[in-house]
Amino acid sequence: MFIGIDHGTTAMRFSATGGEFKITREEAKRFEVALLSRICPPDEIEGIALCYSMGDNIAAITDIRKVRNRGIVSREGAGKHIGGGTRVFDEIAKSGIPTVVIPGLHRGSPTDPRFKAYSHQASPEKCGIAYETCNALGMDVIVSDVSSNTVTLLVSGGKLVGAFDACIFAPGTLHGALDVDAIRRVDTGECTANEAFQHAGVDFTLPEQERLRAVAMFAAMECAALLLLNDRAKIALAGTLAPLIAPEVKALLHRDVTV
């Protein structure tokens, strides 16, 4: 049995052919390998693929024994620090179960160099979403993962070309790019840049009746931008907001959209 572990914004998800479950990141602070018995007995696990944080210190799928600093440059950065993901990583690392760590997309990744204008493009679990999308739709896809934040990736000919990260353009419900107002609040010491990022989503910036329409528009714009690099790519949406915004995204792009 092989298990995949997703380090998400709000939860840790554990999945295999035989089943799946998730726990909050707070609950993950008490994680023990024995918990994997909810899927299968731990001694029947042949291997694990693990996502952790931004994955910006490795550029290839790497044996966990060869990964330094849990595969990240620093724990500092855009996102809330809880400790659940760290606990899961460390418990898996010392378990002896064969495990690989999935990289994110960043300046060290073999993506289109133009995307490296920004230091980070996508976290490891987004690469997993892109892989699943390619299995379903083919080797030329654009997938936008839309939930608490929005990240959009392009795959051409089965190769990850690049992505727009959560802090670059399209907002999600909680997170988004820092605008002029946010920069001013950071400069005056009202909040940190990380706190500003965590409060830049539409739940904080727009009235309720405009939120989904805005997220749909920005997600569609990211998809449209990536179509410049591959106009044959099929469009897919993932994440909790995907079924809610799919009709609007389809109308804006004048293309079929898969959820």
Image (cartoon, helix red, strand yellow):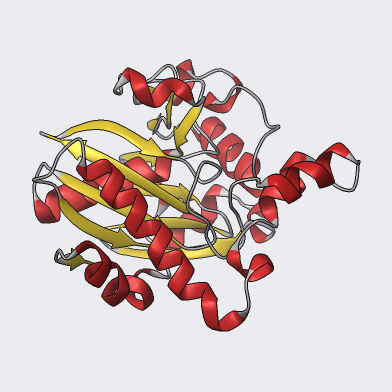
**244 sits left or right of 138 in the view:** right
Residue that appears at 16% across and 47% down: 134
Vertical arrangement, residue 28 with respect to residue 126, above or below: below
Residue at left 75%, top 50%?
A: 181
Q: Position of residue 99 (x, y in %)?
A: 40, 32
Residue 8 in picture, x, y percent from top left: 52, 53
Residue at image location 19% in from the left, 65% down from the top: 257
Say if 229 sits above or below 44 in the image: above
Residue that appears at 56% across and 17% down: 68
- The residue most toward the bottom is 209
191 above or below 53? below
Front in this rendered view, residue 131 or 3: 131
| Residue that protrudes farthest toward the front in the picture | 180
Residue 115 coordinates in the image, percent (x, y): 38, 26
Q: Is residue 206 left or right of residue 51?
A: right
Q: Nearer the viewer, residue 32 or 230?
A: 230
